[in-house]
Amino acid sequence: MSSTRITAEAPKITMVGAGGMSFGPTMVNDVVHTAGLSGARLVLHDVNRERLDRAYRFAAKLNASSGAPVILDRTTDPAEALTGADFVLSSAEFGRFEHWRQDYEIPNRHGARQITGENGGPGAVFHSLRSITNTLGICADIERYCPDAFLINLTNPMSRVTLAINRATKVRNVGMCHEMPMGINRLARRLRVKRSDIEARASGINHFTFFTEFRNKRTGEDLLPTIRAWFEKPVFDYSPRTQRVARRLDRSLGGAGLVEFNYMPLVTHVVREHGLVPCSVDSHIGEYLPFALDVADWMPVPMDFHEPFSELAERAAAWAADTRVPLPMQIAGMSGEEVAAIIDAMWNDEPARILAVNVPNDGYLPDVADGAIVEVGAVVDGDGIHPEHMDPLGEPLAGWVKTQVELQELVVEAALAGDADLAFKAVREDPCSPPDEASCRAMFDELRHLQADKLPF
């Protein structure tokens, strides 16, 4: 990828959408705890002044608890936020859960078979259109105020938004997601192996990546056979009794969290039937598989966990931002995100291996179309991001990915052209959509009416 070498003493890093209390504090914390970014100017930017001020108060406490290694600022003015920026982090959506519920419930009412409706399925067509429209507005500001900046996009649907950025702008960018690192952590715990002892690689598309390597660095043992054998245990048969227990647990927030990350009939099916070990849980890989709802008599609705959890996190962060109770924020460790590591490696020309980047395919996955956004590992240094070339995905995975790559193309073309007919075609061709055109049309028209002010047509 193109050169990104920068020579100033410390970077200006702008966070767009910093008012989100899951995104903002996490990124601030990671930058604050990255020694190579000491002295950086970190600017929080959001269009919502109240949320921005709250995020800033929280960020100021994080920074102060570590001896104020960064210069912290905030603004609602995009020109002020972006002018002179070296790196831009973007995670920005409007009405996330309100629209997500529409994306999930309306298609399913019309006969769709979605497990989540966020990044795949007919509801994700609308999520994509909204996110692309908003993100391209941010990119226009980057091109206006800091055209040499490097954008790290964290906005979903990751593959489609990243493709739109690369198709419609000249902004240098990469898409980042924490699913692969989280998958390593989850499996390492189950195998009772230290996370630091694991060396892993995975490939695919965002939220649909599969481990190609999972090795104990200390012993050299290939752990993928152990993982596959582990999923053969009777506990993963998900009997009617097990499903009833999971359903009861799902009624509380804590129980729903256990279900989200431990109830995995779809992951089990994919491992057993195809030998594929996913990085993600059912709610993510199931968005791309039309048989996701067929592997068990009951499947949870992931949004019913994520929405109240996000609201709880927002309330907790708001309290932490304003309380006078002394909080030991200095003990907060690094998150599973790899964003600060990329900035550090690029700025200081210190090579670092990154587990997962979302980039246009340039032979990195030989049986995926060139130009499609794929997720692979990479080495990052002062000259940019150098994605790894991986083995072919093989069937049936390559076929599943091919379907999603074709939908990437349709959705992005619809967004860039403002073409409702192309958007409907994407809905009609999604494997999780209602089987008949009339139901697809009714669903499409209802969502279009509700979200008209956020769509590109």
Image (spheres, helix red, strand yellow):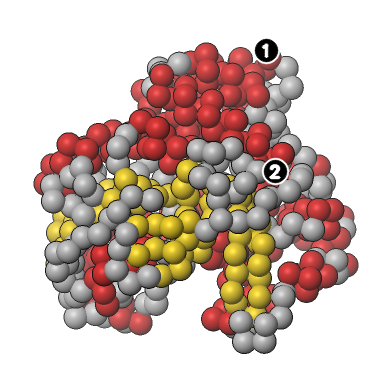
Asked if one can make out residue 28 in the rendered structure from this viewpoint, the answer is no
- Please report the residue visible at 21 percent of the width from the left and 47 percent of the height from the top: 148
Query: Is 22 situated left or right of 377 in this image?
Result: left
What SS does tag 2 mark? helix
Which tag, 1 or 2, sits closer to the chain's start? 2
Query: Is 277 situated left or right of 147 in this image?
Result: right
* Mark identifier at residue 398: 2
Question: Disc 1 vs disc 2: which is toward the camera?
Answer: 2
222, above or below 317, in the image: below
> Three-letter amino acid code at disc 1?
Ala
Asked if one can make out residue 147 in the rendered structure from this viewpoint, the answer is yes
Residue 59: which quarter of the image?
bottom left
> Three-letter amino acid code at disc 2?
Ala
List x then y, in percent, for residue 62: 26, 72
- Please report the residue visible at 14 percent of the width from the left and 69 percent of the height from the top: 9
Query: Is 78 situated left or right of 418 in this image?
Result: left
Residue 221: which quarter of the image?
bottom right
- Please report the residue visible at 59 percent of the width from the left and 19 percent of the height from the top: 425
List x then y, in percent, for residue 317: 34, 63
Classify the position of the C terminus by image quarter: top left
What SS does tag 1 mark? helix
Count of numbered tags: 2
Query: Is 237 situated left or right of 284 in this image?
Result: right
278, 372: nearer the viewer: 372
Circle 1 packing at 10 Å, graded few (<14), some (14-19), many (20+), is few
* Mark identifier at residue 438: 1
Q: Give the alpha-carbon distance from disc 1 to disc 2, as whole Å.
A: 30 Å
List x then y, in percent, for residue 403: 66, 34
Asked whether the beta carbons under mark 1 and mark 2 sit within 8 Å of each other, the answer is no
Residue 277: which quarter of the image?
bottom right
List x then y, in percent, for residue 163: 45, 37
194, 344: nearer the viewer: 344
